[in-house]
């Protein structure tokens, strides 16, 4: 297999000009941070959210310096806390007047064999990744129900929701749940003029993932990618932007794999 170099960064084309987007887990160098940047490059105003206030503040400052303070705001939010989720959605409307796009990116991983996995480990991953997404999807649909013009929800699932991987039962179960939640929400949301889709990345490499994953596991996952490399976070963000834009106007209830993984 021949390794393929990462492609050149794709410039923005104004696909979301004039729209307001909310992104959870958007502080830092992962998919959430890359998505926030891509949304801004496409002309959107963005409300950043994350459970880590200091990282969130730093990321807000960096993006505001580049795109202007009127384009970027931030509010800490732990998606396991319903009151915080409610405040987050209220802040989006209070700050920007309306909300058009919601990207549910918050999730939690970890590695543990089933025989050693504790109830607390299982419950924590499910609460952040699946139930946290549920709370945000529910808040989004309630908001869009009362707002003219509909809206778009994009959830972050994972190929782990379809493919077995040792030590990942809690993460895989949660991501499979996000896929099912996406499909069910899409059916209910269609009457509201709202689209709900998801991305399912295979492997997007960023510094935080390196800290919580062993080199051997990363090497094994990379070896299964047809390109011989992980995705750049912005390559996943590109697909999220597509799903958030009018170019995907007839898509709802879909889970789009962002993967070069070989069968």
Image: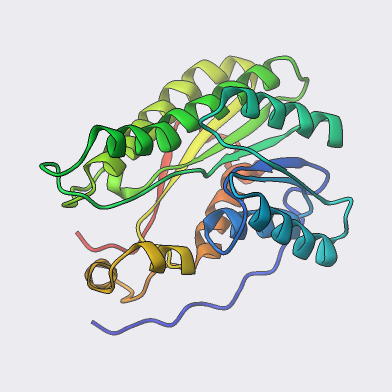
For the N terminus, the quadrant is: bottom left
Question: Can residue 231 be seen from the camera position used here?
Answer: yes
| Residue 179 visible in the picture | no
Residue 223 located left or right of residue 127: left
Residue at (41, 40) in percent of width and height: 255
Determine the image quadrant of residue 263.
bottom left
Residue in view at x 73 percent, y 15 percent = 146
Foreground residue among 7 and 119? 119
Q: Give residue 219's quadrant in the image.
A: bottom left
Q: Is residue 243 above or below residue 262?
A: above
Q: Nearer the viewer, residue 194 or 84?
A: 84
The color scheme shown is: rainbow
Residue toward you, 242 or 50: 50
The residue located at (70%, 32%) in the rendering is 88
Lateral position of residue 85 relative to residue 108, left or right: right
Where is 246 relative to 80, above or below?
Answer: below
Residue, x 72% and y 34% (percent of image)?
100
Compared with 218, 139 (above or below) is above
The image quadrant of residue 128 is top left
């Amino acid at each position: 297999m021949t390794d393929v170099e990462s492609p050149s960064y794709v410039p923005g084309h104004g696909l979301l000009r004039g729209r307001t987007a909310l992104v959870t887990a958007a502080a830092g160098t992962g998919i959430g941070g890359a998505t926030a940047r891509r949304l801004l490059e496409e002309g959107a105003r963005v409300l950043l959210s994350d459970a880590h206030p200091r990282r969130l503040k730093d990321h807000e400052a960096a993006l505001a310096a580049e795109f202007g303070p009127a384009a970027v705001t931030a509010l800490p939010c732990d998606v396991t806390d319903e009151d915080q989720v409610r405040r987050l959605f209220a802040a989006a409307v209070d700050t920007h007047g309306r909300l058009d796009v919601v990207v549910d990116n918050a999730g939690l991983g970890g590695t543990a064999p089933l025989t050693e996995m504790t109830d607390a480990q299982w419950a924590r991953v499910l609460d952040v990744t699946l139930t946290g997404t549920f709370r945000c999807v529910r808040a989004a649909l309630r908001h869009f129900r009362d707002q003219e013009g509909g809206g778009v929800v994009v959830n972050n699932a994972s190929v782990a929701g379809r493919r077995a991987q040792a030590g990942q039962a809690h993460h895989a179960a949660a991501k499979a749940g996000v896929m099912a939640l996406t499909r069910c929400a899409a059916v209910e949301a269609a009457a509201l003029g709202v689209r709900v889709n998801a991305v399912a990345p295979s492997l997007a490499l960023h510094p935080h993932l390196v800290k919580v994953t062993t080199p051997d596991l990363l090497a094994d996952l990379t070896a299964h990618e047809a390109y011989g490399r992980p995705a750049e976070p912005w390559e996943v963000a590109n697909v999220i932007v597509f799903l958030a834009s009018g170019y995907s106007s007839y898509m709802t209830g879909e889970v789009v794999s962002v993967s070069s993984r070989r069968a």
